[in-house]
Image: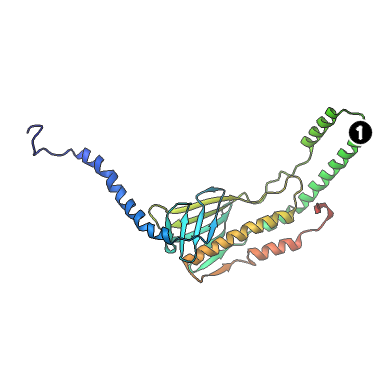
Amino acid sequence: MGAFSDNKENCPVCEHVNERPLTESEPHAAALQENQALQAAFQSTYCFRADQGDGPLFLDEEHGLLRVGEDGWVLEGKALRSFRISEDGAPLFESGIGTLKCTVSDVPDQVNVMAAEIARFHLERQKFERWEAMDGLHRAGTESSEERRERERTNDLRRPRFDVPAPVREFRVELTLDHPYQPAFDARIAAPAFDRNYPRTEDYLKSYREQTEELHLLAAKLMHMIAPGAGETQSGFGWVRSMQMALSRMPRTRAFLF
């Protein structure tokens, strides 16, 4: 038939190319329109921010809603299927069937074991600082300002530093969501580190406790969205009791007082 015939057949490849964007965009546009009502109702009552990954995560506890990102999708609480909060892969808090599962961490015990190593470091640093002070007195009045600055720079390079890794590198928060365009949330935050110059077990455990308490609060709020009124289950003495026991067993020596 002629090229200008009214009965010519359409090209199936062209039809596929032209229609695919429209076909894929229709559900997305419909979901956006449906989400506008939730966006209008959303009022943030809690925000969790991480160092890397998805986020921030906003919760509207009054209306039972959550949102990933500043302008992300607003989801109903029922879209939250499960969550897991861990430290270097080891679970801390997990959603269970009608309960928040809390797992005892061995970090306080690991830190307590390091107390002797930290005490030795302080003795080594004190020895170096005494030598540095005596050397400075010995050289007083005999060296130029430039020589003194160079000596101080050299001493600073030689000064003992506590570069021992902490028991935990990072915490991870993972959410499984029932939503076609926001199926998950995955974020990480750095765990506390020891002070390189004056490490103290008490300081480290205080920072660790503050971070895990915040993660515990987040877990409790998420669990409430899944199952309002859900309780908690803890293995052993529970993570708070483990922290208290570690602090009570910690040796108190002058080497730690700075």
The quarter of the displayed image where residue 37 is located: bottom left
Can residue 171 be seen from the camera position used here? yes
The quarter of the displayed image where residue 151 is located: top right
Q: Quadrant of the N terminus?
A: top left
Is residue 13 shown above or below 89? above
Query: In percent of the image, x 54 and y 62: which residue is there?
Result: 219
| Image position of 35 (left or right of 87) | left
Q: Secondary structure at mark 1?
A: loop
Q: Nearer the viewer, residue 65 or 118?
A: 65
Q: Position of residue 211 (x, y in %)?
A: 63, 56
The quarter of the displayed image where residue 157 is located: top right
Type of amino acid at the residue the image marks with label 1: Ala
Q: Position of residue 28 (x, y in %)?
A: 34, 51
Q: Position of residue 188 (x, y in %)?
A: 55, 50
Q: Position of residue 245 (x, y in %)?
A: 71, 64
Query: In percent of the image, x 72 and y 47: which residue is there?
Result: 195
Query: In percent of the image, x 19 and y 40: which residue is there?
Result: 12
Instruction: Give the residue at mark 1.
Output: 140
Scheme of colours in the image: rainbow
Q: Nearer the viewer, residue 213 or 233?
A: 213
Neighbours of disc 1 within 10 Å: few (<14), some (14-19), many (20+): few
Can residue 106 be seen from the camera position used here? no
Furthest residue toward left: 1
| Image position of 197 (left or right of 29) | right
